[in-house]
């Protein structure tokens, strides 16, 4: 099994912080106003936001896998 090195970016860090903030704000909002659990608009917005986050990271994974497959076999294993 080889190892890969991926550089981080400020944008990726920002996305991770946005995920944390979204989870935190959602949990606090539902704790303070429990009726938000039954509000379909609120839940739709939260789920859509998490969908955007997931799509970004899945897209980045697909891009990285495609780039990895284009390298010659002897360079893939470190």
Image (tube, rainbow, N blue to C red):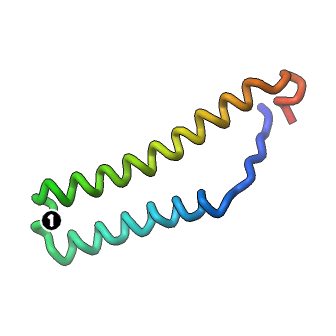
The quadrant of the image that shows the C terminus is top right
| In the rendered image, the vertical position of residue 33 relative to residue 13, given as above or below | below
Image point 88% across, 29% down: which residue? Answer: 75
In the image, taking residue 55 as reference, residue 42 lies left or right, namely left
Q: Which x, y percent locates residue 54?
A: 45, 46
- In this orientation, which residue lies closer to the viewer: 45 or 3? 45
Q: What residue is disc 1 on?
A: 36
Image point 28% across, 74% down: which residue? Answer: 28
In the image, taking residue 75 as reference, residue 18 lies left or right, namely left
In the image, taking residue 12 as reference, residue 47 lies left or right, namely left
| In the rendered image, the vertical position of residue 55 relative to residue 74, given as above or below | below
Question: What kind of element bears circle 1?
Answer: helix
- Give the class, few, some or many, for how many residues have Cα within 10 Å of label 1's Cα (few <14, many ≥20): some
Q: Which x, y percent locates residue 42?
A: 20, 60
Image point 10% across, 67% down: which residue? Answer: 35
Q: Which x, y percent locates residue 26?
A: 29, 67
Image point 73% across, 25% down: which residue? Answer: 69
Residue ranking furthest to the bottom = 32
Residue 38 falls in which quadrant of the image?
bottom left
So how many labels did they put on this image?
1
In the image, taking residue 4 as reference, residue 34 lies left or right, namely left
Residue 39 falls in which quadrant of the image?
bottom left
| In the rendered image, the vertical position of residue 61 relative to residue 44, given as above or below | above
| In the rendered image, the vertical position of residue 64 relative to residue 31, given as above or below | above
The quadrant of the image that shows the N terminus is top right
């Amino acid at each position: 099994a080889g190892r890969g090195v991926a550089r981080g970016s400020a944008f990726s860090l920002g996305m991770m912080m946005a995920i944390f903030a979204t989870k935190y704000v959602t949990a606090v909002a539902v704790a303070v106003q429990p009726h938000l659990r039954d509000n379909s608009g609120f839940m739709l917005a939260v789920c859509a936001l998490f969908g955007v986050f997931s799509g970004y990271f899945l897209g980045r994974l697909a891009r990285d896998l495609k780039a990895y497959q284009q390298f010659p076999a002897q360079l893939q294993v470190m």
